[in-house]
Image (spheres, grey):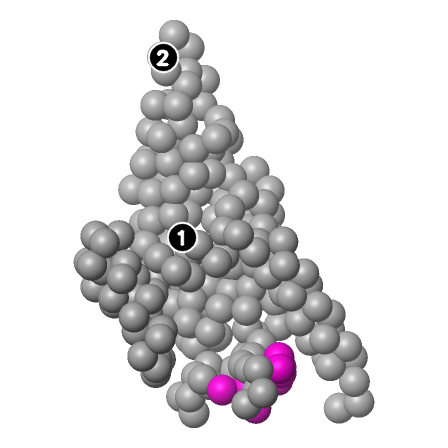
Amino acid sequence: MHGHHHRFSDTPFGFGPRGGFRAGPRGRGRGQDQPPPVERAEVAGWFAGRLPDDWFTGPVELTVDRDEITVVGTLAEPEAGEGNAAAARAGRIARFREETRERRMAVADAAQARYGRSVAWGAVCGDVREVFTNLSVPVMTRLRQPERLVLDTLVDAGVARSRSEALAWAVRLVAQHTEEWLGELRAAMASVEEVRGRGPM
């Protein structure tokens, strides 16, 4: 999950009746109460201006979807001295989380008012990475018997405790094995958004 500065999925997309990919606002699964798509560069610019200069060593890594904006910043590494370096990094992240809580909540409230999405925070220090409060969002889906049987097999085998946990496990597995393809898809969607943004108003 390191360094995915282009990880976002604010363009709704679905699959057509013949299984063909289709993008754009007519894609399935977008409710009327969903927040509108956001311009990634605008979000990045807003956070760059809003976050205190002394929090992170450089620009934050943003992940944006329809429900949430995840902001992960890199912290300066502590001098561990004779101490364990990993423990020092974990301690630095814990200190950042405690000392910035009130100000982070204020930024999150402002972002939610502006973008209609909640904000999750995280920090990286050396090779230690922690995301503090990722939103858990129920995803409504209708599955036919062959798909339900896949989930029930995972539950019966003890891989997952419920159908919803089995579905989350399956999604993680797909993401793990198709990260390159998903990255290409996100990049293609980003360029479509960029071209759309340059179009006649």
**First to last magenta residue range:** 20-28
Q: Is residue 136 above or below residue 96?
A: below
**What amino acid is at disc 1?**
Trp
Per the rendering, the mark at residue 121 is 1
Residue at left 57%, top 54%? 179
**What amino acid is at disc 2?**
Gly
Q: Position of residue 197 (x, y in %)?
A: 73, 79
- Residue 71 covered by magenta stretch: no
Picture quarter with the C terminus: bottom right
Viewer-side residue, 2 vs 141: 141
At mark 1, the secondary structure is: strand
Q: CA distance from mark 1 to mark 2?
A: 27 Å
Would residue 153 be found to the left or right of residue 103 on screen? left
Viewer-side residue, 23 vs 99: 23
Q: Position of residue 174 (x, y in %)?
A: 48, 58
Would residue 126 be found to the left or right of residue 98 on screen? right
Q: Position of residue 49 (x, y in %)?
A: 58, 58
Would residue 182 be found to the left or right of residue 88 on screen? right
Q: Is residue 196 above or below residue 186?
A: below
Q: Is residue 27 above or below residue 103?
A: below
- For label 1, the crowd category at 10 Å Cα-Cα, with few meaning under 14, some 14 to 19 and many 20 or more, is many
Count all numbered tags in the image, as a single digit: 2
**Magenta stretch: helix, strand or loop mostly:** loop
At mark 2, the secondary structure is: loop
Residue at left 27%, top 62%? 153
Q: Position of residue 37 (x, y in %)?
A: 55, 78
**Mark 1 or mark 2, which has the lower sequence index?**
2
Residue at mark 2: 83
Give the quarter of the image for residue 33. Answer: bottom left
